[in-house]
Image (cartoon, rainbow, N blue to C red):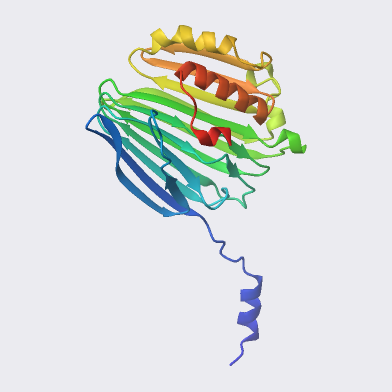
Amino acid sequence: MYDAGSASEIGTSTPAMQRVRGAARIGFSQVSGKTRLQDLYQSGSAKVRLPKTYDEPATAVLINTAGGLTGGDRLDYEVTIGAEAHAIVTTQAAERAYRSLGTCAEVTNRLSIDTGAALEWLPQETILFDNSSVSRKITADLSGNARLLALESVVLGRAAMGERLNKVFFKDCWRIRRDGQLVFADDVRLSGNPEDFFKGFATGDGDQAMATLLDCCPDAEDRLAKARASLVSLPHPAAQCAASAWNGHLVIRFLAADSRILRLLLMAFLEHYRSARLPRVWHC
């Protein structure tokens, strides 16, 4: 029998929205003096591609086939680098965080690097659109003299499109451990109108594109001179950059007016500091 009351209630209820669920796991190990793929798992919207590399470290490219993130989405990535291996993990393109209806998109990155190994975590930028909400966490476990070179960059809107953001929520949490001991922790939390919390001289001075680079290795202090020399030669002197090193960590902060300038800065710095070209996806 037709129930008019039930039909009315169903018609006015909020529909359950489909949400992204993606997980990927990549493992590399050294075999006969070469870094080779040992483990690969992917599900949902999280995909991994392994381009051929010649005389370069093994490279994995992460892809979110959903085309972006919105509230309630979840992506989980796990990377393991075996002893003496060397690999680069990057992304196919910039990640985009779109308008949220109230819940938060969650991105979790778990990294594990064994003794004598090196991981270069070099994703392209994350673009936050108006009313986006993202919580991201990076945890890394290093053994012995393992090295982690990690970059994360964030852009608030697209300046070239005349976009202005009225409200965003972004939380970024880094936890790095060496031999089980916490050695580096960094937290960023942005909530509200970016024009308000970035207008101060000590909080960006109006710039709305930023990046953090961490080089976690036993000889980090010895790399500081090269890092600062690389910063001096950057193509946009108006951008703000600073580097410091202590207790086996080298940290560099970048601030720029827009994503184009920030990207040019990062590409120039990374290729000079690493003495190697970036993965091809960075040049597309």
Locate the C terminus and report the quarter of the image it occupies: top right
Q: Describe residue 225's horizontal placement relative to residue 118 as left or right.
A: right
| Residue 157, above or below 231 | below
* Residue 263 placement (x, y as % from top left): 61, 27
Residue sitting at x 53%, y 8%: 229
Residue 199: quadrant of the picture: top right
| Residue 233, above or below 181 | above
Residue sitting at x 46%, y 47%: 75
110 and 93: which one is in front? 93
| Number of marks drawn | 0
Q: Describe residue 143's horizontal placement relative to residue 198 as left or right.
A: left
275 and 260: which one is in front? 275
Residue most extreme to the front: 54
* Residue 85 placement (x, y as % from top left): 29, 30
Residue most extreme to the left: 32
Residue 145: quadrant of the picture: top left
* Residue 219 placement (x, y as % from top left): 35, 12
Locate the N terminus and report the quarter of the image it occupies: bottom right
* Residue 267 placement (x, y as % from top left): 56, 24
| Residue 12, above or below 227 | below
11 and 216: which one is in front? 216
Residue most extreme to the right: 162
Residue sitting at x 42%, y 11%: 223
